[in-house]
Image: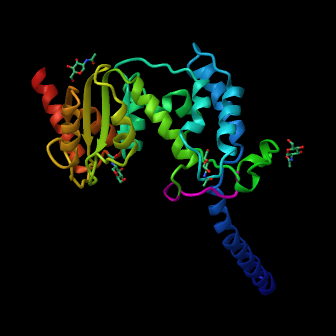
Amino acid sequence: MTNPKTSVSFVLVSMTIWFVMFLLCPSQLRAQLGTTPNIKHIVVGRCYSYMTLVNPSLRYDCEEIWRQFEEAVVRQSSCNVTVEDYHHMFQVIPQTWVCDRFLFWSKTRTLMHSYAAVVPHFWTLEDTLVGYMFNDLIWCGQKEDLGRYYGDNHSFDFSSCPEWSTCRNHPVYSLWRQASQNFAETACGNITVLLNGSIDNAFNKKSMFGSVELDYLNPKRVNYVNIKVVTNLEGPFIESCRQGSIVDLIQILQSRGFRWTCTDNDQTLMILQCIQKPEHSSCQTFANSLLHRKITLN
Ligand SMILES: *[C@@H]1O[C@H](CO)[C@@H](O)[C@H](O)[C@H]1NC(C)=O
Ligand SMILES: *[C@@H]1O[C@H](CO)[C@@H](O)[C@H](O)[C@H]1NC(C)=O
Ligand SMILES: *[C@@H]1O[C@H](CO)[C@@H](O)[C@H](O)[C@H]1NC(C)=O
Ligand SMILES: *[C@@H]1O[C@H](CO)[C@@H](O)[C@H](O)[C@H]1NC(C)=O
């Protein structure tokens, strides 16, 4: 038997909880747009982790990298951090690379991660020290603090940061822009470009690849640009090697003296997509064709 008084107070309590959650939620959302909490510990920790576990042959001064980063971000207003402001930071990060492994991508992030995980030695921006340290983080300085800099706790704005689109020189954008430029400049041997054929403008001239990386690739260092166009299993099938903006990309590459190849239905990429959606009809057809090929080979 339920006591009516208990259920009334239960209802009141739950309503209060809902109301409080309702009040808290928007502020939590806003807070997410501020500098990532514990950013210093995350960045310095990732730097040590990279140096110790990911790439143990290298030595970096993680504390110095942090100091230069902080200096670049907190000295400026939150919409006015240029790529030049990060130059000192990049100077204390020596570059390393291995040819034939560079992987560039645009609008294919999820698939790119599984691709890089199964194909040995692919090297993406997130595998460089800078990419590893700052991946998925947000940061900006506090306007009010201009000219009176008191140390760690006063330097970053943890409550809100401007959107990328509202600033000409967003602190996050400027860092990624410089990192992407460095990454492209060092690219050598065969490089792979993974593009999304399920959207218009798979090759988008405003993307990091289209606006920065492509311009800094050096035809004397790069042997082949191997483009792979990948669509969602269920479509839409909008762009391909012969259709849409990818044709423009190929023209640009050709005019700059690059050798290139372009593949529409890369088998490895298809298998990776099918692992996630094995029941999809195109995966059934694909599996049958693989099976058939194996039988005929035998
Ligand atoms: C942006 O920064 C530059 C130098 O870093 C400075 O000269 C300029 O006044 C700043 N602009 C704004 C709007 O803060
Ligand atoms: C292509 O882009 C769309 C929209 O951003 C995304 O939902 C989809 O997962 C992407 N497809 C691939 C294969 O990366
Ligand atoms: C903020 O930083 C100052 C100087 O570094 C320090 O004395 C103070 O305790 C810090 N405050 C908080 C709340 O961490
Ligand atoms: C580079 O790409 C070309 C064209 O796809 C290929 O023939 C060649 O074997 C590749 N070389 C290496 C080292 O992967």
- Give percent across and percent down for residue 187: 38, 24
**Residue at image point 42% right, 26% down:** 123
Extreme residue in the left direction:
296
Which portion, as a residue range, is magenta? 157-166
Q: In the rendered view, would you say 162 is above or below 202?
A: below
Q: Is residue 163 visible?
A: yes
Q: At x 62% / y 21%, what residue is drawn?
A: 51
Above or below residue 89? Residue 96 is above
Relative to 64, 295 lies left or right:
left
> Which quadrant would residue 285 be assigned to in this image?
top left
From the top left corner, tell me how far across and down residue 116 is, in percent. Answer: 40, 31
> Going by the image, does 247 lie left or right of 278?
left
Front residue of 27/258: it is 258
x then y, percent, for residue 282: 21, 47
Residue 88 % position (x, y): 61, 30
Classify the position of the N terminus by image quarter: bottom right
Rendering colour mode = rainbow
Whether residue 129 sits left or right of residue 237 in the image: it is right
Q: Is residue 1 visible?
A: no
Looking at the rendering, which quadrant does residue 294 occupy? top left
Relative vertical location of residue 62 with respect to residue 273 in this rendering, above or below: above
